[in-house]
Structures are given as structure tokens and as C-alpha cells.
Amino acid sequence: MELLNKLSRCFSPSGREDKIRELIKAEVEPYVTDVYTDAMGSLICRRAGKGKRLMLAAHIDEIGFMVTHIEDSGFLRFINVGGVSAFNCLNRAVEFENGAVGVISYENEEKPASAGLAKMYIDIGARDRAEAESKVRIGDMAVYKGEFSVMGGRVTGKALDDRVGCYALIEGLKTAKDCPNELFTVFTVQEELGLRGAKTAAYAVEPDMGFAIDVSMTGDTPESSFASLSLGKGPGLKLKDASFIANPSARDFMLGAARSAGIPYQLEAAAYGGTDAGAINLSRTGVPAAAISIPTRYIHSPQEVADIDDIENTAALVAKMIETAL
Amino acid sequence: MLLKELCSLCAPSGCEDEARRFIIEKIRAEVPEAEITVDTMGGVIAHKRGEGKKVMVAAHIDEVGFIVSGFTDDGFVRFKTVGGIMTTVLVSKKVLLGEKKVPGIIGSKAVHLQSREERKKPASMKELYIDIGAKDKAEAEKLLSLGDYGVFAGEYTEFGDGLVKSRALDDRAGCAVMLELMKKTYKNDMYFAFTVQEEVGLRGAIIAARRIEPDLALVLEGTTCNDVHGAKPHQTVTKLGGGAVMTAMDSAAVSDRRYFEMIKEVAEREGIPLQIKRTGAGGTDAGSIQRSGAGVKTAVLAVPCRYIHSPVSVMSKRDLESLGRLAEAVLREIERREF
């Protein structure tokens, strides 16, 4: 899990994905024909093939925090970048791109339960504004400082959403033996802000079929609210969420690949959430699309949890899809 | 004066004819070399040919307003808002309706008649109506038709130390800056887009951007300013008199990082006051332009406007001057630099 460890720890809030883009580029370059970065910052990797155009996308951004104001006292005010939960971020550590560390807390007159982000601040240990400004500027972003650990057959860390998807895409690309399609593996930006990077990438790629490889919440924890996926039972083949409904041809393609490779899978139809599949689906005149979900607990927290077998099975499924002609 | 003229134009989203006519005339008179196109949404695109990058500069010509949705038997006008207007702002305001600019007042129950409960909460849209002085429905229908548009009435006035109060500063301020910028000569292939329907969801800009297919875009805006009584420093969003404003991130777009850093550098080098917007709320045409086609690098520069989306927004002329200087310096820097 060394690669996943590196990916998880990398700093990459939406709109500031430079570091992870370079990391991934170095990993995939030997396995693709050409690679470029588009205007939004997505990494578009092409492996030449004679067949139709297949797009596989995983997003490289993560949720985070942006500094909007520095108080005279040295505390930072901030806004959320993507779906940050006020509950999850209370008294948690965050880290800036330059390594500066902070702790998020809330105005004391507020009860923790009612403290929204507007009543919260980041304490970077600065004694005053001057010291704070020596470390951080307005407009700078931070991400959760999550610890990456292997817990037996499972891993925990920040930004497994969607670094596990990136990992599966990279590993699938490395291990696929054949490439009958014109393959585009796309590492998209700004997914957490509304599937933004996938929209422009899909426009450029003009795929015949597209898949997002992303995480999805599970329903296998004590008294959890309903969600169909469980950890360890294989990748979820997502037929619907709030952003798309799988086109039958896309559904059959991923189901066929999973079956023929003997990979365990779980079918999934979600009422909520969105993935890059939604943006790909509605690109130009329409693209058959679906999503593959790696079951993940505590999504958008500093310690998300996923299963190593699920991650490796997703990589194997990606490899099989790459090897299958559209 | 250009800004005063622009602010006198009535152009609610979807009914921007008056502003469009004025702007086309202005461009023809002052920038005769520009090629003018009116796109299918009604946006005005002025092209000044150049050799280098394709650069789109955008400001929206529409403003928030009203649309007539019906008439009561006793001659009052029912209406809906067009774009984001708080109902608390509506009560007792003067409006102009229809092509003939029929004057009206947004009416509600007098304070004497309100119950204790009613006084505590703002009037809802259901209780509000526009009084155009008609004695009955028939007379009202002679003056107006269902679907007629309206805007806030309000004079452009200068006051205080270089301040302006006016209707529609959002975004006639941006239009004023763009009309001045257009007169200059550039090396790049320049498209100046006066967009429509921004206030109802950045609609005109997406169509304009698809037509232009720019390499790079700069959006000029009027933006929120909350440096008022009772706001703590971190709640002010922007400061009147604090200079031009740049957005790092709002609900519609994250500015391209290198572009953002480049603009900060330019402002510093040229000694132009620049503040970074202190909120993530609101959206601009940058959201539409950025995600058009295969993607476009965008940045947003703005002028702070107190009481935005009301008949009396307040702006500083010095901030507007800073915006103009900075926008020009940025367009020059783009000619010299790749990023």
C-alpha cells in the first residue's frame, strides 16, 4: 500500500491539485502513449489503440478549507472547499501546502453542535497577525491532516475519496495486458465542487463510453443509515446516483468485465451523491456512462476507511475493462 | 459621464434591449474597428483582431428586476422577482415597469394596520404588489401586459468622498470599465463580451464562451461589500475604498492558481490596491466560461458595492479606477507571459 499511502498523504484540495498531478504523472507515464494537462488542471492520459474511445476517470481533488481572513490575533477565518461537515472538522488538525499545521475550533459562546463554519476558525499557533501572515496568505487552502494506517486488511487515511480510485486506475493501467480501445485514463480536478474537471475533460476526449472510479458510502456500520454497500464484498457497480443513470450498454460492459474476470462485485443504486459519471454522461451529444464504487466508510472525514481487497479487486476490474473491446 | 449613462439603462435579465442598443452605439462610435456580433441569447460580442492568445473579457449588462405576473381586480400588479432580491429590500421601493417605464410603488400594509406578529417578520412575496395608480384591472391592463419586465427606479448620485450611489452598479460598473478597456490597442485576439442573464444563473456567458472558444478569460464585476455597522472584520467580504477585488473561490468557480498569483504580482508591482474577497458565496460568469468547451482559465476582478441588488448600491470611484487600471495591466501582462 505504499503508493496509496503516498497518494492519500498528498496535498490536493479542489483547484490546487498540482502536487498530486505530478505524482500521478510520474507513475503513469511509462504506461501511456501521451499525457497532457488541460486548462482546468486535469491529467489526460492516452494509450493508443485501434478501437473506440474508452474514458476511465478518477478525481484527484479532495475537500478542504480556504483562508478568507486573518485576524489581528493570528487566527484564520475560512470557508469550505467542497462538502466539509462542521461536525467532522471540529478540533481536527489541518495542513497547508507549505506544511503549516492548524487546528480547527469554534467561537466559545457557540455550542459545538450549532457552530457552523462561519463561527469557526483555524489556529495555526501564531501569536499575532504578522506571525500568521508569515505562514499563510488569504486564498491559501488546507486539507485534513489524516494519518494513513493499515489496519489488518483495511486502510484508513484522509482523501481515500478518491485516492483509492486513483490507485485502482493507476494499478489497472499498469497491469492491463492488452489495449484494444483508444484508452483515456483521466485524473480529474474539482469533482468535489460539482464534477467540474470531468466536464471539460470529457468534452476534449469525446469518449464512446465513460466510467468514473470513485468511492461510495457503506451501510455496514452499527445502526448506520441505509446504504447497500459493505466493505470487503467487492467493488460496487453503480447503476444510479443523483448525477446519472447508467446507460444499459455501460452497465453491461462493466458487469461483463467483472463476471468474466471472476471479480466479486456488489450492485449499487444510490439516491444521493454525484460522480464524474454524471458529467461524462451529459458531455456533448451524450455518452453512455456508469460508475465503479470502492465501498468507503466515514467519507469526507480525516480518517476514511476502505478494504484492501476491494481496492485491489477494483484495480483488477479496471485492468479487465481496459483489456475488453467496446 | 459613462457610468451614469450606463446606470440609467433599464435591462432586467431577459430584457436587455435598452442596454444592448446603448452599448452597440457606444462601440460603433468609439471603437469603430471592433466587429460586433449579437449572439442568440442577446449578448454583445465585440471582437478586436489580434495575433496572440484568444482572450475573452466579460461583463454582464443585465440587472435584477421584476416581471409582471398578473393583475388584481382593483388594479394592482402582481409580480415575481427576476434574479436575487431580498423581500425586505422590496417594500416601499419605486419601480419602472414595461417599455413605457410606467412608474409604480411596491406596496404593503401600513405599519398601523399590522399586528404585533406581522411587524416582527418581513413581508412575504404573496403580500406584496405594485401600485401603478390604476383604478381597476382594465386600466392597469391598458398600461401593462402580463410578462412585462420592470426594474428598480433610482438616480445616479455622487456623495461623500468620491462615492457613488445608484441602481444597477452590478454590473454597469464592469461594463464601464470594459468600454474604456476596449479603446486601447492589444496584441492578443480580444473578445469583449457584454453578457446577458447573468443574474438568473450565468446563462448568457456560457453561450458567448462557446462561440468565442477563448484561451483565457477575465470577468469584470460588481461584488458584495459588507463593511457596514455591526460586521466583524472577517464578515466584511470586501471594503469600500479598499481597491479592486479579486475572487479566489466562490460558489461558481475557483480561479486558476497561476492566473490568480500573476494578478496579485501585477497589482503589487503597479501599486494598485487589491483585496481578496472574503467569502465563498455568490457566483459570476467565470463559472460558465471556465467550464465551456475543453475548459478555460478564468479570473474575476470586481469593484465593491454596498447594498448590492437594491435601488441604491454604493461604490467608490477610486475602487472603480483601481479596477480599470488593474484590468488593463493584467491584459498587458497576458500579452507578455505564458502561465
Image (spheres, rainbow, N blue to C red):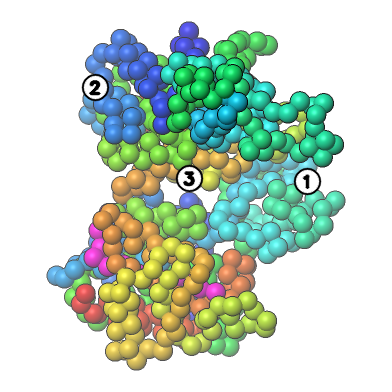
Q: Which residue is mark 3?
A: B253
In the rendered image, residue B186, in percent from the top left (x then y), is placed at: 30, 22
- Spot occupied by residue A1 in the image (x, y as percentages of width and height): 49, 79
Which residues are drawn in magenta?
A: A204-217
User: In this view of the protein, can residue B264 be seen by the observer?
Assistant: no
Tell me where residue A77 appears, x and y as whole percent. 69, 46
Mark pair 3, 1: CA separation: 33 Å
Amino acid type indicated by mark 3? Ala
Q: Are marks 2 and 1 in contact (CB under 8 Å)?
A: no
Give the residue at x 50% y 65%: A273
Residue at mark 3 shares a chain with residue at mark 2: yes
Identify the element where label 3 is drawn.
Answer: loop
Total numbered labels placed on residues in the image: 3
**A13 versus B16 height, above or below:** below
**Mark 2 falls within which chain?**
B
Looking at the rendering, which quadrant does residue B75 occupy?
top right
Earlier sequence position, callout 3 versus callout 2: 2
Residue A191 magenta: no
Residue at the spot 38% in from the left edge and 37% down from the top edge: B205
Marks 3 and 1 share the same chain? no
The extreme bottom residue here reads: A262
Residue position for label 2: B35
Amino acid on which disc 2 is placed: Glu
> Could you tell me how far apart the alpha carbons at marks 3 and 2 are, in whole angstroms?
29 Å
Secondary structure found at label 2: strand
Instruction: Name the side, left or right, on which B213 lies relative to B110.
Output: left
